[in-house]
Image (spheres, rainbow, N blue to C red):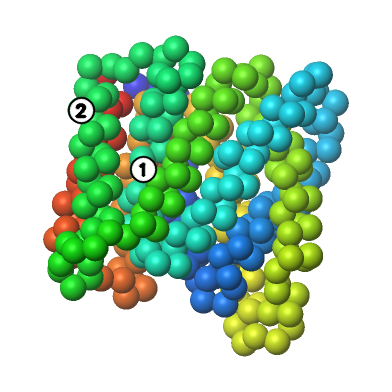
Amino acid sequence: MLKKSGAVPIFLLLVLSLIWGTSFILIKQGLKVFSPDVVGALRVTAASLFLLPLALPRLRELKQGDHFKLLVSGLMGIFFPAFLFAWAQTRLNSSLAGILNTLSPLWTMIFGALFFTQRFRGFAIVGIVISFTGTILLAVSRSGGSVTGFNVYALIIVAACALYGANLNWIKFKIHDLGSLTITSVSLLFIGPFAAVYLFGFTDFVETMANKPGAWQAFGFITLLALMSTAIANLMFVKLLKISTPLFASSVTYIMPIVAVMWGVIDGEKLVVGHFIGMAAILGGVYLANKK
């Protein structure tokens, strides 16, 4: 049951699903010009600059030890996943990346049980086994319809989801006293300089922008990704949590992959039966793992 009646929670849910579901095709467009490390570094740098005006005044809220905790949160939840998703999508369809991203809630449960004394509910273990079986099926399915060979790039997204899961537990149990806006903006403030130094000092970003055709268009795609998916969507999610229930808000996990697949098909990606079976297994497993 929603805490507030009306269309606002449903509207926010649909917009969030659209934003996060679109992020994978934006990464794909950026990779047409930039290397994956440029895509990751540019995404983090741009998002950090966008939330800089919100982060600076919130530094006064921090207590001793919060700076390190927020740095760790930024590295696990934003910095490394930005690079991993870009790297994985050099050999993985954006639609499949969107489906694999739904493993994040399962990793949240696993890390909670292993390190934070959380307990699995009845269907959780079954759901985890089914979802990871679906992951394997996605990794071995080929566009030609065969299931020979293993695409290790799927495991890169699994690793990124594991970082997401670890970060959510870290936030819940280590920095739960800070507001969501403070956690997001200040974490980006702390990791932004690392991304910027890497972007301008260790990649060919400047040369590519100056000489390669289509660079400015790709730059626009990655900037849009940073502003919408990394910054604005997180603020909207906090708002959704305030006016609805956690169960309702978490349903974005099930809608987002539909958007990712839709964009992938529009962009010419081909899916076979094995892909659809794997997707169904992952979504069904996530549902069972979160079933009360």
- Residue 5 x/y as whole percent: 41, 27
Q: Left or right: 40 with respect to 291?
A: right
Does the image show residue 238? yes
Label 1 sits on residue: 102
Circle number at residue 126: 2
Q: Real-space Cα distance between discs 2 and 1?
A: 16 Å
Quarter holding the C terminus is top left
Q: Residue at x 74, y 29 (%)?
A: 68
Quarter holding the N terminus is top left
- Residue 53 x/y as whole percent: 80, 44
Q: Quadrant location of residue 251?
A: top left
Q: Nearer the viewer, residue 269 or 115?
A: 115
Q: Nearer the viewer, residue 149 or 226?
A: 149
Circle 2 residues within 10 Å: few <14, some 14–19, many ≥20: few
Residue type at the position of mark 2: Val
Does the image show residue 259? no
Residue type at the position of mark 1: Thr
Q: Secondary structure at mark 2?
A: helix
Q: Earlier in the sequence, mark 2 or mark 1?
A: 1
Q: Quadrant location of residue 139?
A: bottom left
- Residue 109 x/y as whole percent: 39, 25
Q: Left or right: 150 with respect to 85?
A: left
